[in-house]
Image (cartoon, rainbow, N blue to C red):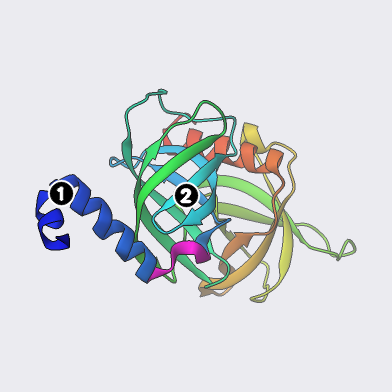
């Protein structure tokens, strides 16, 4: 009887069941609580959100940037979710279908893991802003000038004449970027991307950001991504 039931199912129903079985094999629940960027097929950033209540191939998205930047619709939409899993220490990309809710919670269905990557978790935007930074917890150390090479929701790349070490924690100010004017960005240096005499390029990740700072950072990245500067 079960065999005949399987033949009676529509292609869409069989696809949904296969997505559910794949999600159970991949154990996606490890990504519950992860912050993600939700993008469309053409790469536009819709919103930054938290992935919550992940069960099998279904989850909820809690938006954290004053709602969505896309037109509200009742129609489901195929999206990509990119985030950084602190549990695994790597970037993660998932695909799924979202149904926008009336409030801050959206439904995500047919979630599937697309890629695990040790590289950057988020979209990065090339920039040329000036900045300054100091070592976190070292107020006696003078401020160092730097250039902001690129930035995203997950972190930032800066260049400086100052010699710093991997693991150093810094407080960064970005100059000339309205949304982040006079904002302190706590960062940690993860790697030295380039090293020349008197020149160093550092790849940094943001440390814990509160909700307001996360919103401001999202608005800044979105404006840069869409050429509003």
The picture places residue 153, in percent across and down from the top left corner, at 54, 49
Residue to which mark 1 is pinned: 9
The picture places residue 140, in percent across and down from the top left corner, at 90, 64
The picture places residue 136, in percent across and down from the top left corner, at 80, 63
Alpha-carbon span between mark 2 and mark 1:
24 Å
Instruction: Specify the principal SS of the magenta part.
Output: helix
Q: Is residue 175 above or below residue 116?
A: above
Rendered residue at 67%/73% (across/down):
163
Residue to which mark 2 is pinned: 59
Quadrant hosting residue 213: top right
Magenta segment: 26-30
Query: Where, quadrant-wise, is the N terminus in this rendering?
Result: bottom left
Is 29 included in the stretch rendered in magenta?
yes
In this picture, residue 94 sits left or right of residue 210: left
Quadrant hosting residue 204: bottom right
Q: Is residue 172 visible?
A: yes
């Amino acid at each position: 009887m079960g065999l005949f039931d399987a033949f009676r199912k529509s292609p869409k129903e069989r696809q949904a069941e296969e997505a559910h079985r794949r999600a159970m094999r991949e154990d996606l629940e490890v990504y519950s609580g992860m912050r993600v960027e939700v993008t469309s097929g053409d790469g536009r950033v819709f919103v930054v959100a938290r992935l919550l209540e992940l069960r099998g191939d279904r989850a909820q998205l809690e938006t954290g940037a004053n709602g969505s930047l896309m037109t509200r619709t009742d129609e489901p939409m195929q999206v990509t979710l990119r985030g950084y899993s602190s549990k695994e220490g790597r970037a993660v990309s998932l695909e799924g279908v979202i149904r926008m809710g009336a409030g801050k919670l959206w439904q995500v269905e047919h979630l599937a893991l697309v890629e695990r990557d040790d590289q950057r978790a988020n979209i990065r935007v090339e920039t040329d802003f000036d900045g300054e930074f100091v070592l976190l917890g070292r107020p006696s150390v003078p401020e160092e000038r730097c250039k902001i090479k690129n930035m995203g929701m997950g972190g930032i790349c800066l260049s400086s004449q100052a010699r710093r070490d991997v693991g150093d924690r810094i407080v960064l100010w970005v100059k000339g970027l309205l949304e982040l004017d006079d904002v302190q960005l706590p960062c940690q240096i993860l790697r030295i991307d380039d090293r020349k005499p008197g020149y160093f390029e550092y790849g940094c990740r943001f440390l814990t950001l509160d909700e307001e700072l996360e919103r401001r950072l999202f608005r800044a990245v979105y404006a840069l991504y869409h050429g509003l500067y």
